[in-house]
Image: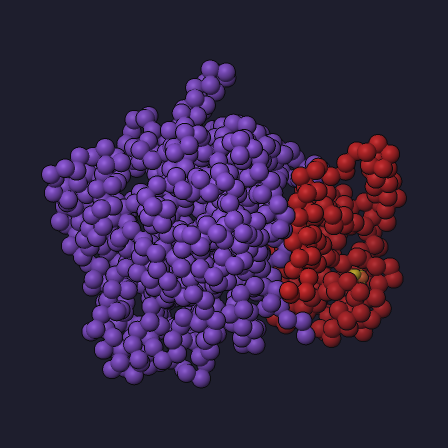
Chain colours: A purple, B red
């Protein structure tokens, strides 16, 4: 019989577990994709509108059926509205995460939240200084309170000025460009188009409003608002999440971890933290590692407690606490199938509802904790910042209690795990460079490094797991292109062993020499998906150093296995910042030639950044190399 | 004889035909009425073959394999429309019709038409009640993309030939470019899945 597993995953541990799933006839995301075939083309093309109940309307892509919805909306309008809504949801998810961090910092500053503290005072003063908040001679909680206040103002202020975080962090030339664009569009068309975000919440609400029945029908206007809303995420919500998490939990430092299912321990209580936020998982890690809990686990016959991460919660505790990571999105079912997981505790985002039924087939407790993510069949332990310690203890105890019910006969842990050097905050990168971006600029100018590609995003079950991530990354470093990135890509690269110092042997000669000199791998883990903001900050530092706009730099972005609306927001704020972005799979826009053209062609002239689609890793690398060459030529390199 | 002809290259896999068929054959005649009702009869199924979608339903053959094979005499031809009609009251659920149908167009379950709450065969009835009134079968009416046509073959052939000739002779694309690209990308996505694992 033909083996399905190797076609479904490029990760050997994934393949092993998929074979076990097949033998055991276990349901999985791969099986559910097959069961969903054929999938509706209207949805894939973006030409299905469900915005009002005169609909739903579908615009036939073949041109046989109606070309307008009941209200008269064309395919262009419908596609642009649907895309805008995707960007709004993605931006809202990141930003709402950022809001919670800001509220926690506020609570800590005011002494109302006592289970957390300000861990990184250096980062606090740096962020405050950047925001123009006085630091000298002031007590730190007061400074923290001001930082939290400025952050929260970015969410809720009502004037039309650009938000403070964007104003403080966005490179000068990019800010001027966007401002000028707004002015030029007004002058040339007489109509107002906005690009600079006025409020993080406002830009999402704006999209919900303008995509309501009978509002904005102009694809260009809808796309530009999607850019504004996404910029409010990248230079707002996500950036706030990253910066304030660093203040609360510490700015990531370089460290070594292990990645893949092999990090599970056969004779220990295995506790998986999954989702996106560090607020709870930091506490879970802290309590799980406490002597008291380790002893409790030993009392139950386990050797101790082993915490491992999944997805971006995994990335958060990996970056700061050096917690090993069990896998990325497509591993979330496979990890339970090892039969060795006592508890999987989740917060928000990218958590398959299917996990509850799967966990029920084992002794595994699926524990939901967020008001915003409840799953039927899971155990809900409500998390609240002001009683974080208590909740974390209960979660760890629940995991320990589950250990006795484990059926050792069903346990199989694939042996694979790779070492990875991680923890590259912008601060750590600057430290490796000796304090400024000048050495990086120099090696790029010399051509030792041709350019930088930032790879982000998810797994997508339509793409062989990690295959695009692995092949594209390997292709790029071999061509002397430095690869940085976040999210499930970062976990894929770590699992593939691409984040080791020895990976430089696979790099081109120029990149290899730079890596040797700086003592870094050629593939750089910059954190979770909200930490895509770290890439923006780095790009901004390069642009400001050279006194150019970001679109002049030899930078390219990519989301080669993307799945979520958050990825739409990330891709769009990269584009809005001036970075060309590769996507695979194709977003649901092909039903509108006009929107497709705006995103892939017109955006280039207007924003400098634009989207392109490529399904083959090598061809994608070719295209990126060509873009980098074009930018280098533009800089006279 | 008019038949339902399928142009699978135009099928978008929206399954609008399935829903329309289900409503048409449900006693409530309403979408809300059939939600959660396991007896609902869906006579057309959009099946996936790699990247292509194909709405499969009875071809109303003449002579019909199923009719020849049915020992209970449960399958007969409608004289007006030529449709092959299955009478669940006579059906003994022996399965012969399903075995011989070259298109696997026959299914079994307890439908609203099944007598005594037992499983019987069911299949497309060409919406004869509609066709007699001069209306299109429900699936054909529902299909927006022109994947389904209920026509005389001669007419259909002439139209298709003309359309194809316009493409060959005048270079007119029958299919919008982005839709052609979408189809091509899907084809390649599935081809990639078929490739041997590296
Ligand atoms: S908004 Fe227009 S296109 Fe959308 S469902 Fe309503 S009538 Fe149809
Ligand atoms: S059920 Fe099958 S054999 Fe019978 S008429 Fe329909 S397609 Fe032909
Ligand atoms: S309604 Fe038409 S396009 Fe939709 S699935 Fe049926 S045949 Fe295909």
The foreground one among A28 and B109 is A28
- At x 36% / y 80%, what residue is drawn? A267
The percent position of residue A517, horizontal first and vertical second, equals: 42, 52
The percent position of residue A308, horizontal first and vertical second, equals: 36, 66
The foreground one among A272 and A206 is A272
- At x 15% / y 54%, what residue is drawn? A114
- At x 85% / y 68%, what residue is drawn? B68
Residue A389 seen in this snapshot: yes
The foreground one among B56 and A478 is A478
The percent position of residue B81, horizontal first and vertical second, equals: 81, 51
- At x 40% / y 52%, what residue is drawn? A518
Q: In the figure, residue B62 lies in which quadrant?
A: bottom right
Residue A229 seen in this snapshot: no
**In this image, A500 relative to A293: left or right?**
right
**In this image, A229 relative to A557: left or right?**
left
Q: In the figure, residue A130 lies in which quadrant?
A: top left
**In this image, A548 relative to A54: left or right?**
left
The percent position of residue A575, horizontal first and vertical second, equals: 49, 36
Q: Quadrant of the C terminus of chain B?
A: bottom right
Residue A549 drawn above or below residue A262: above
């Amino acid at each position: 019989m033909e083996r399905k597993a190797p076609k479904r995953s490029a990760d050997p541990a994934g393949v092993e577990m998929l074979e076990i799933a097949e033998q055991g006839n276990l349901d999985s995301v791969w099986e559910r994709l097959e069961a969903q075939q054929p999938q509706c083309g209207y949805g894939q093309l973006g030409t299905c509108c469900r915005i009002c109940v005169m609909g739903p309307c579908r615009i036939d892509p073949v041109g046989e059926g109606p070309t307008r919805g009941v209200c008269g909306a064309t395919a262009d309008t419908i596609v642009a509205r649907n895309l805008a809504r995707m960007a709004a949801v993605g931006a809202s998810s990141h930003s709402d995460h950022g809001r919670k961090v800001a509220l926690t910092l506020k609570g800590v500053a005011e002494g109302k939240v006592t289970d957390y503290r300000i861990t990184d005072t250096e980062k606090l003063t740096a962020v405050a200084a950047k925001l123009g908040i006085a630091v000298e001679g002031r007590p730190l909680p007061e400074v923290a309170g001001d930082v939290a206040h400025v952050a929260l103002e970015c969410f809720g202020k009502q004037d039309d000025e650009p938000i403070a975080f964007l104003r403080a962090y966005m490179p000068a030339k990019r800010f001027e460009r966007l401002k000028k664009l707004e002015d030029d569009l007004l002058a040339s068309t007489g109509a107002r188009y906005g690009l600079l975000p006025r409020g993080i919440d406002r830009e999402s609400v704006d999209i919900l409003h303008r995509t309501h029945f009978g509002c904005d029908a102009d694809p260009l206007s809808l796309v530009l608002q999607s850019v504004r809303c996404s910029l409010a995420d990248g230079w707002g919500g996500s950036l706030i999440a990253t910066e304030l998490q660093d203040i609360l939990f510490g700015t990531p430092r370089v460290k070594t971890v292990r990645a893949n299912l092999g990090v599970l321990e056969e004779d220990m209580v295995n506790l998986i933290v999954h989702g996106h936020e560090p607020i709870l998982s930091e506490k879970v890690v802290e309590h799980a590692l406490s002597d008291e809990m380790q002893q409790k686990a030993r009392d139950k016959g386990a050797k101790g407690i082993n915490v491992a991460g999944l997805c971006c919660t995994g990335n958060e505790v990996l970056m700061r606490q050096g917690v090993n990571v069990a896998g990325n999105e497509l591993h979330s079912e496979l990890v339970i199938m090892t039969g060795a997981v006592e508890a999987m505790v989740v917060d928000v985002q990218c958590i398959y509802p299917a996990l509850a039924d799967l966990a029920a087939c084992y002794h595994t407790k699926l524990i939901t904790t967020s008001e915003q993510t409840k799953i039927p069949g899971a155990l809900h332990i409500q998390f609240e910042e002001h009683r974080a310690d208590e909740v974390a203890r209960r979660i760890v105890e629940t995991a320990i209690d589950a250990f006795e019910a484990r059926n050792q006969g069903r346990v199989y842990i694939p042996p694979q795990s790779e070492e990875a050097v991680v923890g590259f905050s912008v601060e750590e990168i600057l430290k490796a460079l000796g304090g400024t971006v000048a050495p990086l600029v120099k090696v790029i100018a010399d051509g030792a490094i041709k350019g930088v590609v930032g790879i982000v995003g998810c797994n997508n079950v339509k793409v062989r797991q990690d295959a695009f991530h692995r092949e594209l990354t390997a292709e790029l470093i071999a061509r002397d292109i430095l690869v940085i990135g976040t999210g499930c890509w970062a976990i894929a690269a770590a699992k593939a062993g691409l984040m080791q110092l020895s990976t430089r042997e696979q790099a081109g000669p120029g990149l290899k020499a730079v890596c040797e000199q700086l003592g870094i791998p050629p593939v750089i883990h910059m954190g979770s998906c909200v930490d895509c903001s770290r890439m923006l900050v780095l790009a901004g530092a390069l642009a400001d150093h050279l006194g150019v706009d970001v679109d002049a730099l030899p930078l390219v972005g990519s989301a080669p296995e993307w799945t979520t609306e958050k990825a739409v927001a990330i891709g769009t704020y990269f584009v809005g910042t001036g970075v060309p972005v590769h996507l695979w799979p194709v977003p649901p826009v092909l039903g509108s030639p006009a929107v497709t053209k705006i995103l892939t062609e017109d955006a280039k002239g207007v924003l400098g950044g634009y989207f392109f689609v490529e399904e083959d890793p090598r061809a994608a690398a070719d295209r990126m190399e060509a873009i980098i060459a074009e930018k280098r030529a533009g800089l006279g390199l | 004889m008019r038949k339902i002809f399928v142009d699978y290259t135009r099928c978008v896999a929206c399954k609008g035909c399935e829903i329309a068929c289900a409503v048409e054959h449900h006693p409530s005649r309403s979408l809300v009425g059939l939600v959660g009702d396991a007896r609902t009869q869906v006579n057309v199924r959009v099946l996936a073959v790699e990247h292509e979608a194909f709405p499969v339903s009875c071809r109303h053959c003449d002579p019909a394999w199923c009719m020849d094979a049915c020992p209970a005499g449960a399958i007969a031809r409608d004289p007006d429309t030529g449709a092959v009609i299955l009478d669940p009251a006579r059906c003994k659920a022996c399965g012969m019709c399903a075995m011989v149908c070259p298109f696997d167009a026959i299914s079994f379950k307890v439908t609203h038409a099944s007598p005594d709450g037992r499983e019987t065969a069911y299949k497309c009835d060409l919406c004869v009640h509609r066709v007699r009134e001069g209306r299109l079968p429900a699936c054909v009416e529902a299909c927006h993309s022109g994947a389904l046509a209920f026509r005389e073959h001669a007419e259909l052939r002439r139209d298709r030939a003309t359309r194809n000739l316009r493409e060959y002779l005048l270079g007119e694309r029958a299919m919008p470019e982005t839709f052609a690209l979408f189809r091509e990308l899907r084809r390649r996505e599935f081809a990639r899945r078929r490739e041997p694992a590296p």
